[in-house]
Amino acid sequence: MHVEPDVTAAIRGQLDRALARRRAPWRLLPLVPLLAVLPVAPAGAMVLYSLLIGWALWDMYTWRRRAAACWPQWLDEAVPALEDSSALLARAPGSPLARLQRARLEGRIADVGRAQYDAIARRHCRPAPLPFVLSALAAAALWIAQPAGKQAPSAPMKAVPATRATATAITMKIAPPAYTGVRPYETAPRDVQVLQYSTVTWCGSAVELGDGSTPQASGGCAVWRAVESATWRPADQPRQRYTVRVTPDQPPVVTVAAPVEATQVLGPNATVQIAVGAKDDYGIARATLHMTLARGSGENIKFSDREVPLPQSADPRRRDWSKRWSLAELGMEPGDELYFFVRATDNSPEHPHVAQSPTYTLRLPGPEAETLDSSALPSMVKPESLRSQRQIIIDTEQLVADLRANPKLPAAAVRERSEGIAADQAQLRRRYGAFLGEESTLFGDDEHGHDEHGQEHGGEHGGEHGEEHGAMSAGTNMAKMFGHAHDVEDNATIFDPQTKAVLKRAIAAMWDAEKALRAIAPATALPPEYKALAAIKELQQAERVYLHRAAFEPPAIKEEKRMTGDMAGAAGTKRPQDKAIDTVPADVKALVQALSSGAPLPGGWNRTALQAAGAIAGEEGRLAAQRAVQDVADGCVPCRPALAAWLRSTLSGAPVVLQARPEADTPFARAWREAR
């Protein structure tokens, strides 16, 4: 019962090995051209090698599937003794006669040897020269594409071959700061990139930095602390120059994953998820969650601060913390606001970096105010006759309910009530519009309309101005005499743009509500009334603004000099009006002129040029200017224009000084002024 799988597996195993022996030469032959081109183009050869490996695996898989499907037919064609019955070996026979024939075949299949399996493979597996041809063509293309005499790429540095042996005698030792956890290492002279505040040591020869300084010697080696990028060269080989680029330590990155919005309004029994995190490239020394609770309104607002440290994690470079807070844990009551942010400090002991996230606000609304007394507009005074927006909504809803309950209400009564609500809405709109400089209304029922202004101007200006026409002079204010300012400019600029946008939205909604009420359509007036109420509530909620504390710390007062009147060392802030400030140093100006004209350079020009080059903005420009200074110091005459251009870029024009023009007070001038 268990012989059938063994016989089938034995036959397929013999046939697979025969096919592998037949295909092996054609699978290995394409590798020969790649081995020939490998020293010239290693990258391209490795790519082609990967493609050939993939093709060989695919070819093996294809032939195994083909043999599994066709081996009974192949055996019948190659072994006549099987009497075209090999299919009985692939499946279980169903009849007694088939089982008898299968037993006979199992005895005969054992006589089939390796030579017969190899013959089957040769008959059905033909040669495949196409991969070899493609491999040879690809190898030839790689060989032709390489330029003649190309060698392995060298280090990217400016070098002189004749001095390479001397330069390589120097050994560079780079020790990163201990807090980074990066191990020190040694290297040959080359362009390197180091961490900020790393210690660079040169052993074997004295070196000179691009800024003209010489590192301190310690134990026969030159030691330098990498604060900013610089160039250096061996003292005995001035033409050899290398660059040390400094990578500054990045500040921590703080994130607030939850809540997502900067301002979140909470419900009465809500819970809030606060998920914060901080990460740094080397380590986090301290990370805290700062929370400030604001309670109260108006001028009676109390703040309480709370600081929660973020727990450490297995990775010292990260701190992640998430917690779901209840209102009781936050200490919030209706009407309170909670402000929180994350602050993180990295593990740099000498120059720690501090990062802080934006401030997020959790707001728990209190009971809604019924009047405008708690509005965010501090200068608004509510008269007794001014109704609030909520009262206007209540009156409008009552009118709509009365119309639905009694559709036969007198039209005069409905009109009177609707116009009365519209009048209240107009008064409230004008009160808010006063803060945007508005004065006119749609229906002309203002206290000071344009018509009244016209009458006043027509009467008063006609009489008074007519009398003053004869007394006009050069100092007469024409705008004051004939003009009339309808709006007060200061009213339109006392609020920030966000507050003015909310005010405009509220006023526009009040306009729509008033027009609907004037048209005796109270139901249509309700949506804009609610829109105006929402804008007013937004102004009320913006009453409380949280700002980080930024206190000024004045310098300490010297008690021994206080109240003594001693002015020694005090610098005056006044300057003569007839003298301009010269922002171009005289030594730099003289050096630029000497470089441009080819004249001898002034004494101490190296120090002057290096100081000016150090003020160039940008790392690449500063290093290039320092290299130009070294080249000119080495006697390179063609390098003078380049250095002059770098120094000229550091010069700024003198500011324009406005001077008073003197005017002589002569008798003729006095007589002329009196005659005018």
Image (cartoon, rainbow, N blue to C red):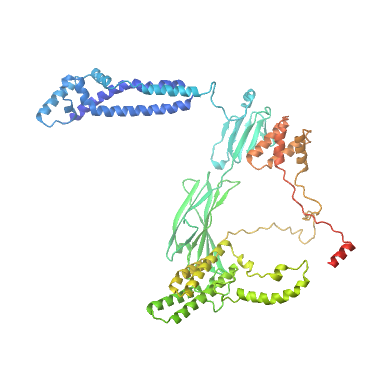
Q: Nearer the viewer, residue 286 or 3?
A: 3
Asked if 230 appears above or below 253 in the picture, the reply is above
Asked if 219 appears above or below 454 in the picture, the reply is above
Image spot of residue 175 (x, y percent): 58, 37
Residue 83 appears in the rendering: yes
Asked if 588 appears above or below 451 in the picture, the reply is above
For this orientation, the residue located farthest to the left is 96
For this orientation, the residue located farthest to the right is 667
Residue 226 appears in the rendering: no
In the image, taking residue 436 as reference, residue 70 lies left or right, namely left
In the image, taking residue 499 as reference, residue 35 lies left or right, namely left
Image spot of residue 373 (x, y percent): 54, 73
Q: Quadrant of the C terminus?
A: bottom right
Q: Nearer the viewer, residue 296 or 507?
A: 507
Q: Quadrant of the N terminus?
A: top left
Q: Nearer the viewer, residue 198 or 640?
A: 640
Residue in the picture at 67% in, 75% down: 458
In the image, taking residue 632 as reference, residue 418 lies left or right, namely left
| Count of labels in the image | 0
Residue in the picture at 57% in, 50% down: 354
Image spot of residue 89 (x, y percent): 18, 27
In the image, taking residue 463 as reference, residue 105 lies left or right, namely left
Image spot of residue 374 (x, y percent): 54, 71
